[in-house]
Image (tube, coloured by chain):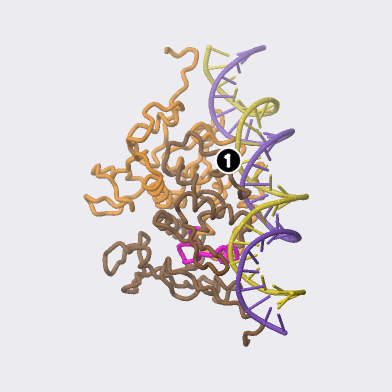
Chain colours: A orange, B brown, C purple, D yellow
Amino acid sequence: MTTVDGMALGKDYAAQECSIARALEIVGERWTLLVIRDALYGVRRYNDFLVHLGIPRAVLAGRLQALTDEGILEKRRYQDAPPRDEYVVTDRGIALWPALRALGIWGREHLGGQPMRVFRHASCGTELSPYDTCPACGTLVAVRDIEMRPGPGLDPDPADPVSRALLAPRRLLQPLESEQQPTAADPA
Amino acid sequence: MTTVDGMALGKDYAAQECSIARALEIVGERWTLLVIRDALYGVRRYNDFLVHLGIPRAVLAGRLQALTDEGILEKRRYQDAPPRDEYVVTDRGIALWPALRALGIWGREHLGGQPMRVFRHASCGTELSPYDTCPACGTLVAVRDIEMRPGPGLDPDPADPVSRALLAPRRLLQPLESEQQPTAADPA
DNA sequence: GCCCTTGGTTCAGTCACCGAACCTGTGGTG
DNA sequence: CACCACAGGTTCGGTGACTGAACCAAGGGC
């Protein structure tokens, strides 16, 4: 079907009896974790992934297919007029959030620079601990109760519309409303 | 020097202003996180990585070099007679443990099967929570205070000596004592 | 009728990965 | 001293994945 169908990693992590290795067989390929990250941020449409990630089209199609096969994304018809599908992250995908969060924290702390994004407990506004607990409430905060805000390191005026839409404070998983491209009839 | 020197990912994750993407540029390549996992398990020597991972030699050499350059491993002379170096994981590498742990938990919970390894608080023996806190002590347990034991899913009689050495309960970071190969003069 | 958008597929070129062979420095053994 | 083993690589040919650009197709909107 797609160009990529041998899949996984061609040669898998062979004799690795290890949950980490098995996880990496699914999500360890180039781009895959970034696709999931975007899905958690609310990106759902092929074109939005494409624009935001700058990923080659064929690779994106392959990854979306593979992630759908693995039950990490779900392909869902969202309009019939012109038939259009979106890719919605499943519980299995949401469960990858702690891993992505840990990677992000490592990247920020060990590669220098300002934080790109800040995560807060939506209901009380408190910034989350590295393990997604709310210091104020003392509870583990569910992914859909996490509010994402731009951090000081983030470019305040990005080029692509998806990055712009992601500048506004928003909950994780909340579907992205892509900016409408002004058509010819649209006033500038 | 090595075959891999363009490095990183050839083409980096371009415009990604994101700590996750920056982390993945360093540790997102095939095999890299498994090398770090092994390093945290106490593997230090080229040959032990080679045997345990089943990774092509050139790829391993490239990864060790890259991780050394990034300050995640440190190359250290451990004997002079025949000059031999070992690769020891640094604090920066140790800081990746939460990410690896999160990936492992995801792999176990969402890909089925028995846990391969169990992690306990070394000083009290209590099994750790997903976020490395000790339910008994209520504290965050440092990586070097984590004891690793084989879980029910692990092959009790693996082929390679490194896997065998990793069967014994041991602390993370504790250097691996590789089994000596019996020489001709050695009694069976 | 024409062009635009969305969501792809196809294709040629490049680059990383793979496995096997080879190399080097050193030490042990008969 | 000849010979072999071992650790830690490097080199090399073949394969497969990734890349970027072009092409395709189904619907709408004007």
Residue A139 painted magenta: no
Magenta span main SS: helix
Residue A153 picture location, percent across and down: 36, 35
* Residue found farthest to the left: A136
**Residue B40 belongs to magenta span:** yes
> Pointer 1: residues within 10 angstroms few (<14), some, or many (20+)?
few
Which residue occupies the foreground of this view, B38 or D4? D4
Above or below for C28 versus A160: below
Residue shown at 39%/56% (left/top)? B91
Q: Please give the name of the residue rendered at 54% of the width and 59% of the height, measured from the top-left corner.
A: A22
Q: Does the image show residue A19?
A: no
The residue located at (50%, 44%) in the rendering is: B25
Q: Quadrant of residue C1?
A: top right
Q: Nearer the viewer, residue B99 or A126?
A: B99
**Element assignment for label 1:** loop
| Dot 1 amino acid type | Gly
For the C terminus of chain A, give its image quadrant.
top left
Q: Quadrant of the N terminus of chain A?
A: top right
Q: Which residues are magenta?
A: B36-53
- Residue hosting label 1: B10
Give the chain of mark 1.
Answer: B
Front residue of this view, candidates B69 and A155: B69
Residue A164: x and y, percent?
Answer: 40, 29
Reply above or below: A142 against A79: below
Residue A162, percent across and down?
44, 31
Position in image of residue C18 (x %, y %): 67, 56
